Image (tube, grey):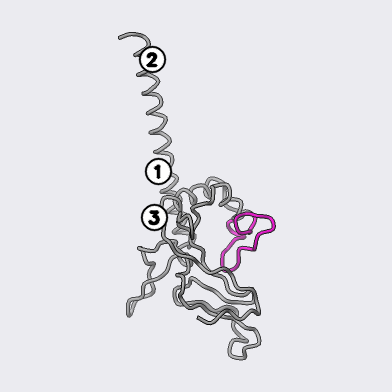
Amino acid sequence: MPASVRGFFITSLAAALCLLAACEKNADAVKRGEYLTRISGCHDCHTPKIFVAGKPPAPDTARLLSGHPENLPYPTWMSQDPNEANALVLTTPMLTAWAGPWGVSFAANLTPDKETGLGEWSEETFIHALRTGKHQGQANGRDILPPMPIQDYKEATDEDLKAIWAYVRSRPAIKNRVPTPIPPGVQPPSS
């Protein structure tokens, strides 16, 4: 076999092994990210629920991490409302929208849908958002609101946040336009 052909095969084999190693590393990150997503409760808010009589709500596996379903009613919180004066927070049965003194917040669509989810985000943007507590990590961006435990994610390692990102990116894209937060004291438009 001529040296040039042998060199080509060796280079090709080396490239294939590197690609295989990268794929294996990514598969490990996705698996770790899935684990971290489950134990940190991401599905508690970011996944709509299915209701079966006599059982607690269960995550709707067809809509994992797709956020508050668009056009679904959500709670309001007006501090002057005497019926809600003692409430700290109100939520929907699906636990995807929350109302409190900060206004109304909605669980974001974390799927890689380019129009309604994180499809246009980069890993760096995702990590920066969780480190700063600002939407898209922009210094002048809106705050990521309760009940998102942003103070906990600020303490996560880069490796763990990259793993969560790898898992989120591995999920199917689901088109679901989540409403933007409603500031405190603003009456939301009627549905």
- The amino acid type, in three-letter code, at marker 1 is Ala
Above or below for 100 versus 154: below
Residue that badge 3 annotates = 172
Give the side of residue 153 with respect to residue 168, left or right.
right
Precedes in sequence: disc 3 or disc 2: 2
Q: Position of residue 20 (x, y in %)?
A: 38, 33
Q: Which residues are magenta?
A: 132-153
Write the residue at 57% across / 47% down.
124
Q: Position of residue 102 (x, y in %)?
A: 64, 73
Q: Residues within 10 Å of mark 1 (few under 14, many from 20)?
A: some
In the image, 145 versus 189, the foreground residue is 189
Write the residue at 53% across / 79% down.
75
Precedes in sequence: disc 3 or disc 1: 1
As helix, strand or loop, the secondary structure at mark 2 comes to helix
Residue that badge 2 annotates = 7
Q: Position of residue 108 (x, y in %)?
A: 51, 63
- Cβ–Cβ below 8 Å for labels 3 and 1? no
Instruction: For marks 2 and 1, give the CA distance.
Output: 30 Å
Instruction: For marks 3 and 2, give the CA distance.
Output: 40 Å
Which residue of the protein is positioned furthest toward the left in this rendering? 1
Mark 2, mark 1: which one is toward the viewer?
Answer: 2
Residue 27's label in the rendered image is 1
Report if residue 151 lies within the magenta region. Answer: yes
Precedes in sequence: disc 2 or disc 1: 2
Instruction: For marks 3 and 1, give the CA distance.
Output: 16 Å
- The amino acid type, in three-letter code, at marker 2 is Gly
Which residue of the protein is positioned furthest toward the bottom in this rendering? 82
